[in-house]
C-alpha cells in the first residue's frame, strides 16, 4: 500500500483544523465588528445637503441658540426643522443677493419646502421623544456632539440600541443642569460624579429599560 | 518525470495475521519478551488486545468530565449573567434568578461541552489527523482496514526494557527496581565463622590482639587512605579526636593516644568498626573486612608515632623527618 | 422465560431448559446471515459506495427527491421575499404547519439516537447493522426540523438575536425562561452531538474506503475524511471509550430534546397543551415515529442493495416490536388526554376534548386513533412482522398518523380558544405544503446521496458480528496481572 499523502500532510491537516476554526471565529468577530462600524451606522459620515448649511457658522460665529430654529425641542417629541421663514428672518436682509442662498429664497417665494436629507434617522419602530430628555437634563451636545464645530452636520454617535441602553442603564454621567441644555463644550461646575447623582434625584431621573418604552 | 526510489529508513517490524486470536497471542508473547514499543492494528476493536499489549486505561473520561463541567458552568453562568446582571427583565413576575428555568439550557450545554471534549480529546490523544504514517508503507497494510491483523513493534536502543540503577519500577508494587535480599539468603563469600579472627576480631570469643594477615607497607598505605576517608572526619587525621565533624559540634571521640586505647586489643578496633560504639555508627556496610583490618593497622601506626623514640627510626630515614614532603 | 412442564419434585432439568432456549433461539433469526467473513461483509457494504455503476433506481429516486427539494428552494425564496404571510397561519391559529413539521421531524430523528446510543448501552447486537443509516436519518431529520424555527421568524438574519446569545448591537440576550429558547439549545446541541457521534462512527469505515478505493481522487477524499485512521490498538481503545461516553451523553440528551419540545406546549396554558404527562408522551411518540421512518427507509434500501444478509428479519422484527411498544404508550397517552379532560372538571378541557372528537377537525382525530391505537395492533402477529412489504406500508401510515397527532394537538387546540368570538378555521396554503413536501425532498435527497457516497451500514461493527471475530486464547491473559 503506497502512501497517499506526503509526510507534510500531517502538519497541514492539523494546521488546517485550527485555520478553519479561526476562520469561522474570525468571520463571527468580523460580523460583530461590522455591525458597529460607521459603514452600517453612518456615524461621523458627512451627508450631502441641498444647501451647504453650516451649523458652525450660525452657532459659533453668530451665537444663535439651538432653540431659535429647533423650536419644539422642549415641548415635543420632534425637535423641529425650521421652515424657510425662519431663514428669511435674517436672510431677507443679510446676503439677500447671494446666489448661494437662491434655493432658500426660491423656497420662500414659491412656498415650496427645502428638501433636507435627514441625518439622524431612527428606525420607524422606535419612539423617541426629545422633550423628556431635555426635561431630565440631557443636553443637545450629549447625543448630537459639538454641533458648533460642524460646518456640515453629521451623526456624532452610532444611534445603535446599545448606545441608548448604556445611558438608560446609567444616566448619571450624561446629565447636566437644565440651564446648560444647549451649551456646547459644557464642563460641569462640580465633579460629575457628585453632580450626576444629585441631578438624578432633583429631576427624578429614572429611565425605563422595558421594551415598550421605545417600541410602542 | 523520474520517480526517485528513495530508501525508506526502517521504522519497525511488522507481522501479519488472519484472525484476531493469533493477533492477541502474538501480542501477548511479544510483550512478555520485553517489547514495549508495540502496537496492534486491526479492522475492528479487540478488547483482548488491550490486555495483551498492556494498554493502560486512558484519561478521556476525565477530559469529558471537565468538558461537561465547563459547558454546564458556562451555560448557567451565561444565563445568570444575561438574566440577572446584564439586563434584568421582569418576565411574568418571575424572579430574575429563576433557576428552575435555567436547568434545560444548563443541561444541554453540559452535554455539548462533554461531547465536544470527547471528540476533540480522542483526536488529540490519538494524534489524529495523521494522514501520513510509516505503517502505510507496508504493502499489505491496506487490509488492516479489511480482514487482516497486524502487529508492529520497534525497539529503540535508548529505550530498552531494562532499569537504570535505582530507576522506579512499574512492575514491583513497592516501585523499587533494586530488590532487597530475601530473608535467610546465604552469602557467596566464605562464611563468617570459617575465620573467626578475620570476621570478628576475636579468638574463641575473646578480643584478639593480633592481625589475620601480615601487616606490610602496602597494608598500612591502604589503611591510611581508608582511615582518611572514613575515620578522619571525627577522629582527625592524627587520631586525637578533633576531626571536622567534631568542630561542627559532634561529641568528641576519645583520642587514640589514651592509655585505654593504646592498650586495647587490635580486635577491639575491628569490633567497634563492625558494630559501632556509643555515638559511633557501625561502618560494616561501608568498609570491607580487609580494609577494616588495614585501618586497625594504620591506627596502631598512629598510636606508635606519638610514642616512638628516635631510635625506632631507621638510620637512613632520620634525615627525612625534617622533610614532610618525603613522607 | 417459559418454564418447561415438570413434576414438582424433580429439580429443574438443565438439559431441557437449554433445549427450550435452543428452540426459542432457532425461531429467532440471527443478526447476520451465516457464512460471512471479514472480507465479505467489507466488500458487501463498501461495494455500494465504490461501484462505478449507479443503479438506475437510485437515479430515479434521487430525481424525484430532488424535484421536491427544488419545491423547498422556491418556497424559501418566496418566503424570504414576501414574508410568512404566505402561510395559512393567522389568529387564532398562530402556530400551524411550521411547528407541526418541526415536531414531526425532530421526533423522527429520535429513533436514530435511540438505536445508536441506547441500544449500544444495552449491548443490543441488532443495532449494529442499522445504526449508521438511522443516525444519518437523525441528522437529516433534525436539519429539516431546524429549518422551521429559523424560517418562521421570517427574516432569520434579523432574528438571530432572539435565538443565540451573542453580543448584538441592542445589548439584548435570549429570554432563557422561555421553552422556545430551550428548544434552540436542545436542537442545536442534539444536532452537534449527533453529528459528532455519526462522524466518529464513520472514521474507521472511511479508512476502509480509503484503502479499498481504486481511483486516486477517491483515495484522497476518503483519506482526508478518515483523518489517517490506521486501526491502531491504542487508537481503538480511546475510540471505544469516547464512543461509549458519547452514547451515555446522547441517551439523556435525546430524552431531553423531545421533553423540551413538549415544554413548548406544556408550559403554556392552552387546553390540550397544558398537561404534565406531555414529556414522556412526546418522547414515546418520537421513538415510535422514528422507528417507522427507519423501517420506511430500511425496507427499500435492503431490497435495492440486497442487504438481506445484514439487515435480517431479526432487525425487522425488533423494530416492529419497538414500534408496537412505543405505539401502545402513545395510545395510553390518548386515553389519558380523554381522562384528564373529564377528570379535571374544567369546562375548557372538556370542550377541548369534545371539539377534538366531534368538532370540524374530528375526522383527523379519528384517523389518528385508527392508525396509532388500532392499526398497530397488527404488529402483535408474526405473520405481519414477516411481511416486509406490509410493514413498509404500515410504517408509512404510522408517520401519517404521527403527523396527524401533532396537527390535532396544535391546530385543533388553537382554533377554538377561550373566546368563541375569535374562533376560526385554519387552512394551509400551497406554500405550507411546499415547505412540508420540500423538507421531505431535502431529507430524501440527502439520504440518497448518503447511501451512495458513504457506507450506509457500519462496516467495522458488522465485522465484530462475524464468528471469527471472537478471540479464543488458549494461554489466556491472567498472568499479566
Image (cartoon, coloured by chain):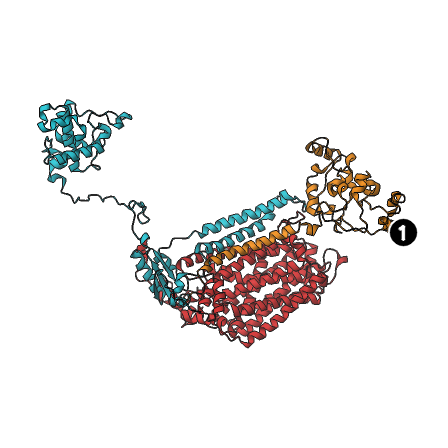
Residue C245 percent across, percent down from the top left: 47, 55
Residue B31 percent across, percent down from the top left: 32, 57
- Quarter holding the C terminus of chain B? top left
Apparent colour of chain C: red
Residue lying at 64% horizontally and 62% vertically, measured from the top left: C100
Q: Is residue A91 visible?
A: yes
Q: Chain of mark 1?
A: A
Residue B144 lies left or right of residue C61; in this view the side is left
**Residue farthest to the right?**
A109
Residue C152 percent across, percent down from the top left: 67, 59
Near-viewer residue (C234 or C144): C234
Apparent colour of chain B: cyan
Residue lying at 77% horizontally and 35% vertically, measured from the top left: A180
Near-viewer residue (C427 or B186): B186
Apparent colour of chain A: orange
Residue B59 lies left or right of residue B312; in this view the side is right
Residue C56 lies left or right of residue A212; in this view the side is left
SS at circle 1: loop
- The residue indicated by pointer 1 is A111
Residue C396 percent across, percent down from the top left: 59, 69
Amino acid at each position: 500500500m503506497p502512501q497517499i499523502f506526503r509526510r507534510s500532510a500531517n502538519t497541514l491537516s492539523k494546521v488546517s483544523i485550527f485555520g478553519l476554526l479561526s476562520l469561522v471565529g474570525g468571520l463571527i468577530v468580523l460580523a460583530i465588528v461590522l455591525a458597529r462600524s460607521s459603514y452600517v451606522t453612518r456615524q461621523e459620515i458627512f451627508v450631502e445637503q441641498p444647501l451647504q448649511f453650516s451649523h458652525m457658522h450660525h452657532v459659533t460665529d453668530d451665537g444663535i441658540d439651538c432653540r431659535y430654529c429647533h423650536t419644539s425641542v422642549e415641548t415635543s417629541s420632534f425637535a423641529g426643522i425650521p421652515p424657510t421663514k425662519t431663514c428669511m428672518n435674517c436672510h431677507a436682509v443679510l446676503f439677500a443677493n447671494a446666489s448661494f442662498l437662491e434655493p432658500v429664497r426660491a423656497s420662500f417665494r414659491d412656498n415650496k419646502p427645502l428638501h433636507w436629507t435627514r441625518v439622524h434617522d431612527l428606525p420607524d419602530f422606535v419612539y423617541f421623544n426629545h422633550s423628556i430628555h431635555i426635561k431630565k437634563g440631557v443636553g443637545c451636545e450629549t447625543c448630537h456632539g459639538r454641533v458648533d464645530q460642524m460646518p456640515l452636520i453629521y451623526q456624532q454617535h452610532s444611534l445603535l440600541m446599545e448606545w441608548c441602553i448604556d445611558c438608560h442603564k446609567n444616566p448619571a454621567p450624561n446629565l447636566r443642569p437644565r440651564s446648560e441644555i444647549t451649551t456646547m463644550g459644557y464642563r460641569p461646575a462640580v465633579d460629575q460624579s457628585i453632580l450626576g447623582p444629585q441631578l438624578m434625584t432633583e429631576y427624578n431621573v429614572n429611565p425605563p429599560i422595558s421594551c415598550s418604552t421605545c417600541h410602542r | 518525470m523520474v520517480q526517485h526510489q528513495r530508501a525508506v529508513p526502517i521504522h519497525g517490524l511488522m507481522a501479519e495475521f488472519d484472525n484476531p486470536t493469533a493477533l492477541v497471542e502474538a501480542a501477548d508473547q511479544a510483550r512478555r519478551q520485553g517489547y514495549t514499543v508495540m502496537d496492534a492494528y486491526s479492522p475492528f476493536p479487540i478488547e483482548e488486545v488491550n490486555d495483551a499489549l498492556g494498554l493502560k486505561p486512558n484519561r478521556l473520561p476525565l477530559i469529558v468530565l471537565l468538558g461537561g463541567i465547563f459547558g454546564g458552568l458556562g451555560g448557567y453562568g451565561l444565563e445568570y449573567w444575561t438574566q440577572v446582571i446584564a439586563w434584568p427583565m421582569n418576565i411574568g413576575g418571575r424572579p430574575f434568578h429563576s433557576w428552575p428555568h435555567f436547568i434545560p439550557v444548563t443541561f444541554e450545554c453540559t452535554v455539548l461541552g462533554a461531547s465536544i471534549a470527547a471528540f476533540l480529546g480522542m483526536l488529540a490523544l490519538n494524534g489524529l489527523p495523521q494522514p501520513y504514517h510509516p505503517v502505510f508503507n507496508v504493502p499489505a497494510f491496506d487490509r488492516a482496514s479489511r480482514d487482516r491483523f497486524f502487529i508492529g513493534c520497534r525497539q529503540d536502543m535508548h529505550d530498552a526494557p531494562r532499569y537504570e540503577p535505582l530507576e522506579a519500577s512499574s512492575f514491583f508494587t513497592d516501585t523499587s527496581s533494586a530488590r532487597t535480599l530475601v530473608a535467610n539468603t546465604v552469602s557467596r563469600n566464605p562464611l563468617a565463622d570459617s575465620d573467626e579472627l578475620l570476621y570478628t576480631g576475636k579468638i574463641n570469643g575473646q578480643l584478639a590482639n593480633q592481625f589475620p594477615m601480615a601487616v606490610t607497607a602496602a597494608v598500612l598505605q591502604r589503611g591510611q587512605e581508608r582511615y582518611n576517608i572514613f575515620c578522619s572526619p571525627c577522629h582527625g587525621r592524627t587520631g586525637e579526636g578533633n576531626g571536622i565533624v567534631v568542630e561542627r559540634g559532634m561529641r568528641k571521640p576519645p583520642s587514640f593516644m589514651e592509655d585505654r586505647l593504646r592498650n586495647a586489643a587490635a580486635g577491639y578496633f575491628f569490633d567497634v568498626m563492625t558494630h559501632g560504639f556509643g555515638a559511633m555508627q557501625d561502618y560494616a556496610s561501608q568498609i570491607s573486612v580487609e580494609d577494616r583490618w588495614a585501618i586497625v593497622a594504620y591506627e596502631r601506626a598512629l598510636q606508635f608515632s606519638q610514642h616512638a623514640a628516635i631510635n625506632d627510626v631507621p638510620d637512613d630515614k632520620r634525615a627525612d623527618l625534617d622533610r614532610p614532603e618525603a613522607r | 422465560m417459559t418454564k418447561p412442564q415438570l413434576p414438582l419434585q424433580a429439580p429443574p432439568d438443565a438439559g431441557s431448559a437449554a433445549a427450550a432456549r435452543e428452540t426459542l433461539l432457532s425461531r429467532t433469526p440471527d443478526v447476520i446471515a451465516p457464512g460471512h467473513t471479514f472480507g465479505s461483509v467489507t466488500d458487501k457494504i463498501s461495494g455500494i459506495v465504490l461501484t462505478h455503476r449507479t443503479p438506475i433506481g437510485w437515479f430515479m429516486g434521487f430525481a424525484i427527491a430532488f424535484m421536491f427539494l427544488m419545491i423547498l428552494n422556491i418556497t424559501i425564496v418566496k418566503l424570504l421575499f414576501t414574508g410568512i404571510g404566505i402561510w395559512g397561519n393567522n389568529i387564532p391559529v398562530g402556530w400551524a404547519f411550521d411547528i407541526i413539521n418541526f415536531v414531526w421531524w425532530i421526533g423522527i430523528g429520535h429513533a436514530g439516537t435511540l438505536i445508536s446510543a441506547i441500544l449500544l448501552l444495552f449491548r443490543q447486537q441488532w443495532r449494529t447493522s442499522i445504526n449508521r443509516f438511522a443516525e444519518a436519518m437523525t441528522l437529516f431529520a433534525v436539519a429539516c426540523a431546524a429549518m422551521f424555527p429559523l424560517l418562521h421568524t421570517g427574516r432569520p438574519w434579523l432574528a438571530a438575536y432572539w435565538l443565540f446569545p451573542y453580543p448584538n448591537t441592542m445589548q439584548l440576550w435570549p429570554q432563557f425562561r422561555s421553552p422556545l429558547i430551550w428548544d434552540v439549545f436542545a436542537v442545536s446541541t442534539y444536532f452537534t452531538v449527533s453529528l459528532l457521534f455519526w462522524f466518529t462512527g464513520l472514521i474507521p469505515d472511511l479508512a476502509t474506503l480509503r484503502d479499498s478505493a481504486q481511483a486516486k481522487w477517491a483515495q484522497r477524499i476518503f483519506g482526508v475524511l478518515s483523518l489517517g485512521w490506521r486501526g491502531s490498538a491504542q487508537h481503538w481503545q480511546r475510540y471505544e471509550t469516547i464512543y461509549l461516553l458519547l452514547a451515555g451523553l446522547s441517551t439523556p440528551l435525546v430524552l431531553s430534546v423531545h421533553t423540551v419540545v413538549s415544554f413548548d406546549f406544556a408550559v403554556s396554558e392552552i387546553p390540550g397543551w397544558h398537561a404534565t404527562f406531555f414529556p414522556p408522551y412526546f418522547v414515546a411518540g418520537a421513538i415510535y415515529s422514528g422507528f417507522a421512518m427507519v423501517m420506511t427507509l430500511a425496507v427499500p434500501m435492503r431490497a435495492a442493495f440486497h442487504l438481506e444478509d445484514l439487515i435480517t428479519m431479526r432487525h425487522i422484527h425488533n423494530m416492529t416490536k419497538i414500534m408496537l411498544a412505543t405505539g401502545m404508550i402513545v395510545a395510553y397517552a390518548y386515553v389519558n388526554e380523554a381522562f384528564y379532560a373529564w377528570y379535571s372538571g374544567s369546562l375548557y378541557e372538556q370542550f377541548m376534548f369534545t371539539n377534538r372528537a366531534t368538532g370540524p377537525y374530528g375526522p383527523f382525530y379519528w384517523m389518528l386513533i385508527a392508525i396509532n391505537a388500532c392499526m398497530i395492533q397488527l404488529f402483535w402477529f408474526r405473520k405481519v412482522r414477516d411481511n416486509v412489504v406490509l410493514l413498509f406500508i404500515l410504517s408509512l401510515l404510522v408517520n401519517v398518523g404521527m403527523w396527524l397527532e401533532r396537527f390535532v394537538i396544535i391546530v385543533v387546540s388553537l382554533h377554538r380558544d377561550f373566546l368563541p368570538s375569535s374562533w376560526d378555521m385554519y387552512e394551509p396554503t400551497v406554500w405550507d405544503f411546499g415547505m412540508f413536501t420540500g423538507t421531505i425532498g431535502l431529507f430524501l435527497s440527502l439520504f440518497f446521496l448518503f447511501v451512495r457516497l458513504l457506507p450506509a451500514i457500519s462496516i467495522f461493527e458488522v465485522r465484530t458480528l462475524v464468528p471469527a471475530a471472537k478471540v479464543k486464547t488458549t494461554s489466556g491473559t491472567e498472568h499479566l496481572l
